[in-house]
Amino acid sequence: MKTSDDFELLFADAYPKFTKNLVKAYGNLTYTEIRLCMHLRMGYSSDKILENLSISPSTLANLRSSIRKKMGLTRSQYLTNTILCI
């Protein structure tokens, strides 16, 4: 089983500037919110995200809502599309 550190290293190799750009643009995100954004950037399904982050579906929904709010997105705007542009 891959550890959190393994995921972060693989992610950094695939998207070396993403986390820096994300924090620069949205410095008020928590560590967990940043990790969710990383998973969304990798194109992971909700089920895979739930498994990797060991969170419940309601926690995932709350995190997505919190990130949307911090990014100034409305409910009709897609979080993943915004993340793909970072």
Image (spheres, grey):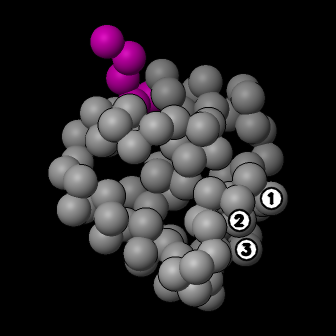
> Can you see residue 18?
yes
Label 1: state its secondary structure. Answer: loop
Q: Are marks 2 and 1 in contact (CB under 8 Å)?
A: yes
- Residue 53, given in percent of the width and then of the height, sits at 31, 41
Q: Name the residue under label 2.
A: 82
Range shown magenta: 1-5
- Residue 10, given in percent of the width and then of the height, sits at 61, 24
Q: Tell me the quarter of the picture where residue 51 sits.
A: top left
Q: In front here: 15 or 45? A: 45
Q: Mark 3: few, some, or many residues within 10 Å (few <14, many ≥20)?
A: few
Residue 2 falls within the magenta-colored stretch: yes
Query: Which residue is painted at 78% across and 59% down in the image?
Result: 86
Q: Classify 38 as above or below 44.
A: below
Label 3: state its secondary structure. Answer: helix
Q: Mark 1: few, some, or many residues within 10 Å (few <14, many ≥20)?
A: few
Q: Name the residue under label 3.
A: 25
Give me the C-alpha separation between circle 2 and circle 3: 12 Å
Q: Earlier in the sequence, mark 2 or mark 3?
A: 3
